[in-house]
Image: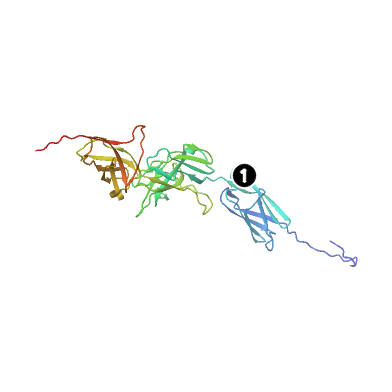
Amino acid sequence: TRVSEGAPLNVVFLSFVEDRTPRIEAVEPGAVVAHGAHNLTISGSNFGVVDFSPKVFLAGIACFETRWVSDRKVICSLPLDWASHRTGTSFALRVEVLHRAISHANAITFASHTYPSSSSAPTHVTTLDASATLTVTGHGLTPPYAAFRAIFYSGNSSFENSGNSSSEGTSAGNGSFQGGSTTGSASFQPGSGGSGGSFAISGPPVSSSADKLVFEVPFWTHPAAVARVALARTPVFSLPLQHPAAGFPWAAGLVEFEESWGEASILEASAAGGAVVTITGAGFTPSDSAEYECDFEGYVRVPATVLSSREVVCTVPVWNRAAGVVRLGLRRRGAALVRVWREANADPLGVNFTTVEVWRG
């Protein structure tokens, strides 16, 4: 209320000044995971009849981006992986427009979420190598850590929702891996069609913490391939854990499994030849059987036949050289395949050719 200068004493002028202090009526959603670049919608009033570049703060930290929509709505984008160490806590939200501000207590709560962020493993792993390890780093990894598994898969293999199954994961006859659940489950399905798919599942982690899991890379018993990696939990083997932000990739990397062999069925043969030797290993490719050869000390190579991804057979040739132990090797397309052995003195592996008495006439 004011009295205007020069106005009659019995005249009073009233002037009304609108209060443009921002008001917050709602913040949606009220709970989000701490990782994921979520958008918060703040509803209320006095956010500006035009865009005055309002600012929004959560626990004193500015939003990654604030977008004015109208005088009654503002959108705040949270940064990725914000406040991951403060899950389960409610935070106050503050809106500033020009020189006016308002705070809203307990506006949002951060919930925990488990997901892997990256992994590291050797780029190349021989199929029988028992020393290779995979390290997965992530957020919100919670006990029991023994429930985690690393799944290596190739081709068209994928996770798909399925119905109920057994209480523990089993390897079905068609090669699919299904995990049980009383309410439904996710099953790991090798690809169907031309390219197919294969997979191998690790054991529980050999080392574990809230942000890192270390697994031994499992034996790859399928044809050699480049495999992707997924992180899942037992016994349900639920869908691979992923970052909650849409389109945020998990830097899982790729592991190329290279075929290798270890043992032979016979270590002694007649120099007259004809014996059949079976070589066991992993990663052999039956469709490429014509490209395999058994190598005897580099002097004689004979064609081999791939029976499965685990077995190759060949016929021992006639040995015209001096009797004795001859080093055995396996080649594919002319290149020697790696041999992996477990006993200290097991290499080189050789076939002992014995002499043969012959007569004429």
Q: Nearer the viewer, residue 68 or 229?
A: 229
Location of the N terminus by quadrant is: bottom right
Q: Nearer the viewer, residue 176 or 304?
A: 304
Residue ranking furthest to the left:
361
Residue occupied by mark 1: 89
Q: Residue at x 89, y 65 (%)?
A: 5
Residue 330 appears in the picture as rendered: yes
Q: Residues within 10 Å of mark 1 (few under 14, many from 20)?
A: few
> Seen in the image, is 10 located left or right of residue 301?
right
Dividing the picture into quarters, in which one does residue 315 lie?
Answer: top left
Q: Nearer the viewer, residue 352 or 3?
A: 352
> Seen in the image, is 186 located left or right of residue 102?
left
Residue type beneath disc 1: Thr
Q: Residue 191 in the image: state x and y as whole percent.
A: 38, 52
Q: Residue 209 in the image: state x and y as whole percent.
A: 52, 38
Residue 181 appears in the picture as rendered: no
Location of the C terminus by quadrant is: top left
Seen in the picture, residue 24 relative to 221 is either above or below; the reply is: below
Q: Residue 280 in the image: state x and y as whole percent.
A: 31, 40
Q: Residue at x 31, y 37 (%)?
A: 263
Per the image, label 1 sits on a secondary structure element best described as loop
Q: Residue 46 in the image: state x and y as whole percent.
A: 70, 59
Which color scheme is applied?
Answer: rainbow
